[in-house]
Image: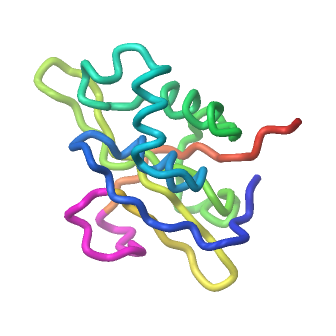
Amino acid sequence: MIVPKKKIRRIIQSDVNGCGLACVAMVTNHTYAEVRKKAFEKLTGLAKNGYLTTSRDVKSLLNIFGFEGSRLIRFSFKNISKIPDLCLFKINRHFDAEGVEYWHWVVFVRDDREMYILDPKKSIRTNKRKDWGRMNVVSYMSISKQQL
C-alpha cells in the first residue's frame, strides 16, 4: 500500500474518455501527455475506442511507470477505513445500448486530515470532491510501487 507522502495534483483529462489516463498520470506523477503517448504506443486498440480504459489497460499503464494495480475489489462504505490511502475508484457504472459496460475512473486519497476524490473530469469545478452521495462507487484498485 502507498501512503501519499507528497500532495498528488489533480490532472484534467484532455480526451472525452481519458479519465483512466489522467488517473494514471496523477498516481505516477507524470503528465497526461506522457501517459497518453505510452498508452498509444503500448495498448492495442485504445485509440479506436476513444481512450476508454479497462482495468487491464490501467494496470498495464501503471506497470509501465513503475507501479502495480491490484485486482478490482468490491467497494462498501462500511469498510472505507480498510481501503488503502491511495487507490483508483471505478464509479458511475452504466451500459450503452449494446450492453457494453462503461464507468469513470477517479483517484481516492486519504491523508492525515481528510479523505477525498481527485476527479479528472473537466466539468468538476473543485479539486477535492467530497460529495460521496453523488458518486456511485462500484469497486477500487489499490496502487503500490513495484518492488525491485
- What residue do we see at 67% from left, 63% from top? 85
Q: Where 114 falls versus 138 (above or below)?
A: below
- What residue do we see at 41% from left, 48% from top? 32
Residue interval drawn in magenta: 121-134
Viewer-nearest residue: 92 or 144: 144
| Residue 63 left/right relative to 121 | right
Q: x and y percent of residue 128 in the render?
A: 42, 75
Which quadrant holds residue 17?
Answer: top left
Q: Main secondary structure of the magenta part?
A: loop
The furthest residue to the left = 97
Which quadrant holds residue 63?
Answer: top right
| Residue 18 left/right relative to 74 | left
Q: x and y percent of residue 73 in the render?
A: 59, 40
Q: Is residue 118 magenta?
A: no
- What residue do we see at 58% from left, 43% from top? 141
Q: Where 43 falls versus 114 (above or below)?
A: above
| Residue 131 left/right relative to 85 | left
- What residue do we see at 63% from left, 58% from top? 86
Count of residue discs = 0
Q: x and y percent of residue 118 in the render?
A: 44, 64
Q: Is residue 133 magenta?
A: yes
Q: Where 123 falls versus 13 (above or below)?
A: below
Q: Quadrant of the C terminus?
A: top right
Viewer-nearest residue: 100 or 26: 26
